[in-house]
Image: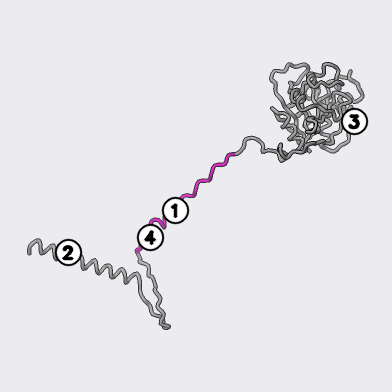
Amino acid sequence: MNNGKVLTILGAVVLIVGIAISVQSVVAVRSLVTQNSGDAIINFVPLEKKAVRQEEMKVLSPAPIPSISVPTTAPSSPSSVSMMAKKVLLDVPFTPQAPFGNWADERQDYGCEEASILMAVYWAKGKELSYEKAEEEIIAISEFEKKVYGNFYDTSVADTLKVLRTYFGYVNARVQYDIGVADIKAELAAGNVVIVPIDGRLLGNPYFTPPGPPKHKLVIRGYDDATQEFITNDPGTKRGEAYRYSYAVMENALLDYPSGRDGDIVNVRTAMIVVGK
């Protein structure tokens, strides 16, 4: 048998085998069953070695979660500039740092920090403050400072906060640096009292002994947009209750100072102590 005939026979065999396999596959996949009712139901019988499509088995990676930028600063107060009340006045009790004018007592002469934290904490605790009680407390705070820190003279905002917390055991207070008019107003609008360190000579208060204290602290208890003024309790004078300073004057006078008697101011920085209820 020559090669040509051999190839022809082999081709025919391959064709027949292919047809047989196709017919068997169709029979294996589908069979027709007739019910008693005469209805026809098609049963699909799965192939034992049926290949499942790769797409059906593919496990998709979850979509990446979008990155969220977290602000590094505190969120804006509900009392934003547009929503802020036009006037705020908190009911903070008042005392001068020398309630009965005893300025010869250094504890009272240097008592603006003590008087300021005293007013703020008594407000926070809802306590009344008489002049008798104020003098007693200012002297007691000064003696506490002398015992614990070595002296009762000028104290920075950081050290004043320490005294507030350690003497009164009151912790709802904090220091904020690099502040201005808007920051102070935001805290007041949120219902907090503010204590600020200032250069008293720049306030222009006619009731200060000229030229005024170069290192001074006072309480800001409110503001009035109609007059563009802060409302303060200034312990540097007996006329300091609800005393008003313009926004511009106050911002110009803001100045933190170091602790100690007559210490030089090296780093010029604004700051405030925020006291909440």
Horizontal and vertical percent position of residue 40: 40, 78
Q: State how far apart marks 3 and 2 are (Cα).
A: 119 Å
First reached walking from the N terminus: tag 2 or tag 1: 2
Alpha-carbon neighbours of circle 3 within 10 Å: few (<14), some, or many (≥20)? few
- Residue topped by disc 2: 11
Q: Looking at the image, is 37 positioned above or below residue 64?
A: below
Q: Is residue 32 above or below residue 142?
A: below
Residue that mark 3 sits on = 133
- Quadrant for the N terminus, please: bottom left
Mark 4 secondary-structure assignment: loop
**Disc 2 from disc 4: Cα separation:** 32 Å
The mark that comes first in sequence, 1 or 4, is 4
Compare marks 1 and 3 and give the one earlier in the sequence.
1
Q: Quadrant of residue 229?
A: top right
Rendered location of residue 108, percent (x, y): 86, 22
Crowding at mark 1 (Cα within 10 Å: few <14, some 14-19, many 20+): few
Which residue does the numbered mark 4 point to in the structure image? 52
- Report the span colored magenta: 49-69
- Label 1 sits on a secondary structure element that is loop
Alpha carbon separation for disc pair 1 and 3: 76 Å
Q: Which quarter of the image is occupied by the C terminus?
A: top right
Would you say the residues marked 3 and 2 are in contact, meaning their CB atoms lie under 8 Å apart? no
In this orientation, does residue 200 appear?
Answer: yes
